[in-house]
């Protein structure tokens, strides 16, 4: 009788190999642990002039290779572009090592907000540029989570590379419920995120409201005004978004919601970028909440990790889900089935 290990080997599209760029090591080690695999030994080098290189110190010929990278984080001084270029070095190294398949695992897709020309004619669309660079380096697939615009998938040439956009909503909602980090009304911070907010509201059987956000694109990360569509008077709020960067939108949203009579406010996002002065702004909101006697909590996921976080910040760990998805890809299974299935969250 065939055992499970030999059955998995037969069904796999190729022997699996996991490796990582240094900025993605924590993510990679955690995912590899859930998969029961070890990381392939590699060496990342940065020269004094700023150039870098990536070496694979094991045989990956004919393997199904997965390369991890975290484009944003606090564990080193590298920029988003430094980290992206190192990922390209790693992909090319795997391609030149004759890997059978190459998948880049990037939970937060860099430059995803640069997905269109925002009323201007003399700017690039770097979300598409990054897609072309990834497939030119040799990536067959890119695994990311809750990308800012689903249309970015169309920026890849389907004959060369495929974007696997993982949705966290069902698992994230179950986790939020298990920790009582929910509200009576789900609020979208802008009209563009309304459909994703609707998915949260349906899972929670909650009401739905939205803020209409007016931006001044002459200033980066600047929201001039937020206007509420819906009723939040006397209600507890779950404000959901895909990305929090400098938290200017959060500040404007909380101000508007409190003006309209909202009670407690929980802010949940998929990608907690938290560029300066985000933490300062969030601390200011927390101080205001404590002074006025209402509850304010912030939730992110481990697509981006932060050290020394306050007790009012909570992180939903996505590594176990990522591990299951990578196994399904290797075994030619259904990714949708994994991300949509219900799972009992770990107890807090």
Image (spheres, rainbow, N blue to C red):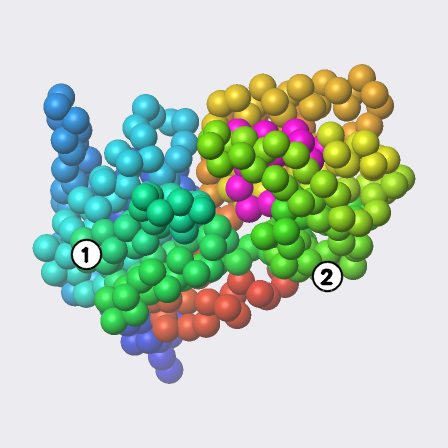
Question: Which mark sits nearer the N-terminus, 1 or 2?
Answer: 1
Q: In the rendered view of the protein, which quadrant contains the N terminus? A: bottom left
Q: Residues within 10 Å of mark 2 (few under 14, many from 20)?
A: few
Looking at the image, which is closer to me, 183 or 17?
183
Looking at the image, which is closer to me, 96 or 225?
225
Residue 322 location, x and y as percent?
45, 54
Residue 100: mark: none
SS label for mark 2: helix
SS label for mark 1: helix
Looking at the image, which is closer to me, 168 or 11?
168
Q: CA distance from mark 1 to mark 2?
A: 40 Å
Residue 154 location, x and y as percent?
37, 64
Q: Is residue 240 above or below residue 282?
A: below
Q: Are marks 1 and 2 in contact (CB under 8 Å)?
A: no
Q: Residue at x 30, y 76 (%)?
A: 10
Q: Is residue 136 above or below residue 110?
A: below
Q: Residues within 10 Å of mark 1 (few under 14, many from 20)?
A: some
Q: Residue at x 76, y 48 (%)?
A: 229
Query: Residue at label 1?
Result: 136
Residue 202: mark: 2
Relative placement, left or right, of 180 versus 307 is: right
Residue 113 falls in image quadrant? top left
Residue 151 location, x and y as percent?
43, 61
Name, please, the residue furthest toward the bottom: 1
Query: Magenta residues, as a range?
Result: 240-254
Q: Residue at x 36, y 71 (%)?
A: 331
Relative placement, left or right, of 99 versus 305 is: left
Q: In the rendered view of the protein, which quadrant contains the C terminus? A: top right
Q: In the rendered image, is residue 18 in sight?
A: no
């Amino acid at each position: 009788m065939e055992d499970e290990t030999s059955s998995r080997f037969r069904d796999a599209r190729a022997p699996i190999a996991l490796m990582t760029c240094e900025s993605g090591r924590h993510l990679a080690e955690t995912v590899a642990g859930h998969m029961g695999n070890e990381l392939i030994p590699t060496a990342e080098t940065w020269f004094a002039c700023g150039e870098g290189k990536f070496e694979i110190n094991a045989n990956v010929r004919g393997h199904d290779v997965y390369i991890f990278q975290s484009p944003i984080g606090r564990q080193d001084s590298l920029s988003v572009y430094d980290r992206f270029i190192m990922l390209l070095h790693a992909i090319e190294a795997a391609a030149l090592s004759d890997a059978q398949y190459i998948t880049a695992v990037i939970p937060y897709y860099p430059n995803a907000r640069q997905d269109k020309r925002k009323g201007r004619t003399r700017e690039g669309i770097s979300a598409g540029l990054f897609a072309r660079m990834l497939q030119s380096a040799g990536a067959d697939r890119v695994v990311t989570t809750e990308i800012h615009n689903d249309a970015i998938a169309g920026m890849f040439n389907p004959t060369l590379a495929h974007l696997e956009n993982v949705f966290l909503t069902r698992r994230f909602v179950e986790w939020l419920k298990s920790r009582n980090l929910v509200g009576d009304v789900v609020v979208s911070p802008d009209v563009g995120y309304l459909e994703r907010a609707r998915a949260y509201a349906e899972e929670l059987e909650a009401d739905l409201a939205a803020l209409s956000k007016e931006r001044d694109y002459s200033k980066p990360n600047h929201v001039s005004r937020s206007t509420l569509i819906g009723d939040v008077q006397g209600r507890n709020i779950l404000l959901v978004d895909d990305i929090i960067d400098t938290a200017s939108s959060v500040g404007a949203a909380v101000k508007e919601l409190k003006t309209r009579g909202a009670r407690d406010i929980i802010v949940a996002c998929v990608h907690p970028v938290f560029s300066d002065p985000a933490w300062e702004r969030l601390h200011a909101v927390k101080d205001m909440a404590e002074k006025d006697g209402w509850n304010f909590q912030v939730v992110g996921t481990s697509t981006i990790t932060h050290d020394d976080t306050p007790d009012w910040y909570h992180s939903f760990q996505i590594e176990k889900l990522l591990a299951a998805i990578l196994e399904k890809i290797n075994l030619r299974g259904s990714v949708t089935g994994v991300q949509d299935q219900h799972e009992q969250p770990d107890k807090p």
